[in-house]
Image (cartoon, rainbow, N blue to C red):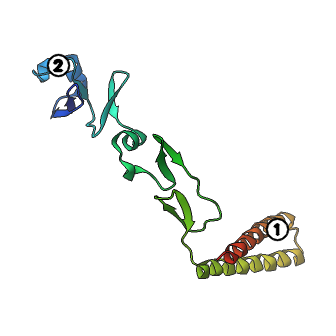
Amino acid sequence: MTHIYDNNLNYILTLNYNFEEFKTKPKKYFPDWKNSYYASEQKYEHPVIEEGQIREMTREEKILNLNMSELLQDGEYIKNGEILIVECPESILRKAWDKENHIWYETMTKEEIVEVRANKILEYQKLVENKNMLEASKFTSTDEISFIVVKMNNLEIEINNLENKIETF
């Protein structure tokens, strides 16, 4: 298939010809062909010319040049002709993006955060029990215990962070 565009990149038509063959003699396949026209193997919705070649606009070009702000992802906004990215803070458990104010916010309720914290405390307790069993075992389990201690330390940090988050409600 060969797709034809005029010099203003307006789509004209699609021809049922092999693109490579078409390129060799465009007037043979399309008598109205002009040297200012463009042909492509793919049909483009938003064509642009770059270094003499036709291609589809990038997402960024569509956002900035065609004002297609619906293509912005969460955490992105336009300022002074640039797409800026706001990273989501790690402290947010269930994130949402405020497109008007360009900020991330938490969507979990205090009750949900309390529940998450309770589950992490229970998980921590199971690790304590597993560690105690491994220490009491007659088998060498230094690596296993070290692994559990690392998990416990990480969980302890998470539990404390959740406590701080609950206090801010």
Expressed as whole percent of the image width and height from the top left, the position of residue 104 reads 55, 61
Side of 84 where 50 appears, left or right: left
Number of labelled discs?
2
Task: Name the one closer to the observer, 46 or 76.
Answer: 76
Mark 2: amino acid? Lys
Numbered label attached to residue 149? 1
Side of 134 where 92 appears, left or right: left
Q: Residue at 64% of width from left, 61% of height from top?
A: 90
Say which of marks 2 and 1 sits in front. 2
Expressed as whole percent of the image width and height from the top left, the position of residue 84 reads 52, 46
Mark 2 highlights which residue?
A: 34
Q: Categorize mark 2 by other alpha carbons within 10 Å: few (<14), some (14-19), many (20+).
A: few
Expressed as whole percent of the image width and height from the top left, the position of residue 10 reads 21, 33
Expressed as whole percent of the image width and height from the top left, the position of residue 122 reads 71, 81
Q: Residue at 38% of width from left, 22% of height from top?
A: 51
**Quick check: 94 above or below 1?**
below
Indicate the secondary structure of the residue bearing disc 1.
helix
